């Protein structure tokens, strides 16, 4: 991680833990918002007006937090407005790096070798992890935000005039309910799988894995319609989906969340499939990057061996990405 703008020790996945051995995730540091007129958002400073071609999103395709923002970019029609750069999925001793892997990009702006160089470009004395997603302003050459929940929400509203007619992912009448469900899903599932995987005591693991499956059980019961809030797709669905699609491929094995597979939940599996079939979503899912990335975490998998399966996820993605007889294409 970076301390006062300098890369210090070799990269390690566990950022912090509490006195019971529970994994604790770092709070994001860049908290500005893109807005239609450049006025400040709920946090940070203003000056980031929604403009075509001004912003770039740095992502890892392994990362569920980055994938939330990529899916929102697709569903909100922002592909021609906000550029994307994909980091190499295999973590190095200096964290995320650029290029050198199929489907990974070089840094087009500064030719950086590692993502942390962008963090120190934005703040020369930055201390903390260099995480994805990172939303970058090419005009002022600085970081806008590295908080995926806020990037997801600003993508929902900021570009409405430039990309009209797209679904509202956080409608006003549902915002409070979405916020409440997001918080539960974040704690027990999105971050819960990491708490299980990076627990450093049996008790911390037991607590986390119980929470993961209690939430999956609840969601299985809840899902009687197409989406979490019935017929309307919301950001809560995007935030749940990114964890589901990684579950059997990465978390079940590497993070030991193996009480059941996602495939053992009929409604959640059908729901995952439904979201994957929404136009553009399958483009954001790269199983090779997901497996190569997670299984490159040496603290959990020292030999770096990437498992062959799971067949049902490989088949699902192949089925959805291949154009079929009805002309369904990815
Ligand atoms: N709060 C951040 C968390 C992002 C995050 O933890 N990203 C991980 C990848 S899944 C990362 O970049 N980790 C690198 C590191 O911790 O050094 C967000 O939601 O945007």
Image (cartoon, helix red, strand yellow):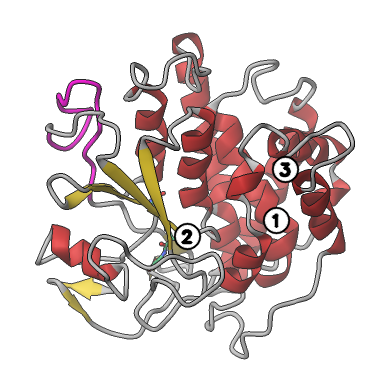
194 sits to left or right of 5:
right
Residue 148's tag is none
Q: Is residue 210 above or below residue 121?
A: above
Q: Nearer the viewer, residue 289 or 1?
A: 289
Q: CA distance from mark 1 to mark 2?
A: 17 Å
Q: CA distance from mark 2 to mark 3?
A: 25 Å
Query: Does the numbered disc 1 mark a residue whose Cβ is under 8 Å from ligand 1?
Result: no
Name the quarter where the N terminus is drawn: bottom left
Task: Point out the frontmost of discs 2 and 3.
Answer: 2
Ligand 1 shows up in the quarter that is bottom left
**Residue at 56% of width from left, 24% of height from top?**
234
Main SS, magenta residues: loop
Give coordinates of residue 120: x percent, y percent.
Answer: 17, 66
Query: Does the numbered disc 2 mark a residue whose Cβ is under 8 Å from ligand 1?
Result: yes
Residue range in magenta is 30-45
Q: Is residue 282 above or below residue 178?
A: below
Q: CA distance from mark 3 to mark 1?
A: 11 Å
Task: Point out the frontmost of discs 3 and 1.
Answer: 1
> The residue tagged with tag 1: helix, strand or loop?
helix
**Residue at 66% of width from left, 66% of height from top?**
288
Q: Earlier in the sequence, mark 1 or mark 2?
A: 2
What residue is disc 1 on? 247
**Residue at 81% of width from left, 69% of height from top?**
309
* Tally of marks: 3
Give coordinates of residue 28: x percent, y percent.
Answer: 30, 51
Q: Earlier in the sequence, mark 2 or mark 3?
A: 2
> The residue tagged with tag 3: helix, strand or loop?
helix
> Does 44 appear in magenta?
yes
What residue is disc 2 on? 60
What residue is disc 3 on? 216
């Amino acid at each position: 991680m970076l301390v006062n703008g300098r890369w210090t020790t070799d990269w390690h996945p566990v950022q912090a833990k509490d006195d019971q051995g529970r994994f604790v995730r770092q709070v994001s540091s860049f908290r500005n918002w893109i807005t239609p007129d450049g006025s400040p958002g709920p946090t940070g400073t203003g000056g980031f007006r929604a403009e075509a071609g001004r912003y770039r999103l740095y992502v890892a395709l392994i990362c569920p937090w980055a994938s939330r923002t990529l899916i929102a970019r697709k569903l909100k029609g922002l592909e021609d407005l906000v550029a994307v750069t994909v980091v190499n999925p295999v973590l190095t001793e200096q964290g995320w790096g650029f290029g050198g892997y199929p489907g990974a990009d070089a840094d087009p702006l500064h030719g950086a070798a590692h993502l942390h160089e962008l963090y120190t470009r934005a703040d020369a004395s930055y201390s903390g992890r260099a995480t994805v997603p990172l939303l970058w302003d090419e005009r002022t050459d600085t970081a806008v935000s590295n908080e995926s929940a806020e990037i997801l929400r600003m993508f929902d509203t900021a570009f409405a005039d430039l990309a009209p007619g797209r679904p509202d992912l956080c409608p006003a009448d549902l915002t409070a309910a979405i916020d409440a469900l997001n918080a539960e899903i974040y704690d027990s599932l999105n971050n819960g799988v990491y708490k299980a995987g990076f627990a450093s005591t049996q008790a911390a693991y037991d607590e986390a894995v119980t929470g993961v499956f209690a939430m999956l059980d609840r969601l299985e019961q809840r899902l009687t319609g197409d989406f979490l809030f019935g017929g309307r797709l919301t950001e809560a669905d995007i935030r749940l989906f990114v964890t589901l699609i990684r579950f059997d491929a990465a978390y079940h094995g590497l993070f030991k969340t193996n009480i059941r597979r996602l495939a053992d939940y009929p409604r959640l599996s059908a729901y995952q499939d439904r979201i994957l079939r929404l136009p553009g979503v399958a483009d954001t899912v790269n199983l090779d990057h997901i497996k190569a990335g997670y299984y490159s975490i040496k603290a959990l998998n020292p030999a770096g061996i990437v498992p062959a399966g799971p067949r049902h996820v490989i088949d699902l993605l192949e089925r959805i990405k291949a154009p079929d007889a009805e002309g369904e294409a990815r």
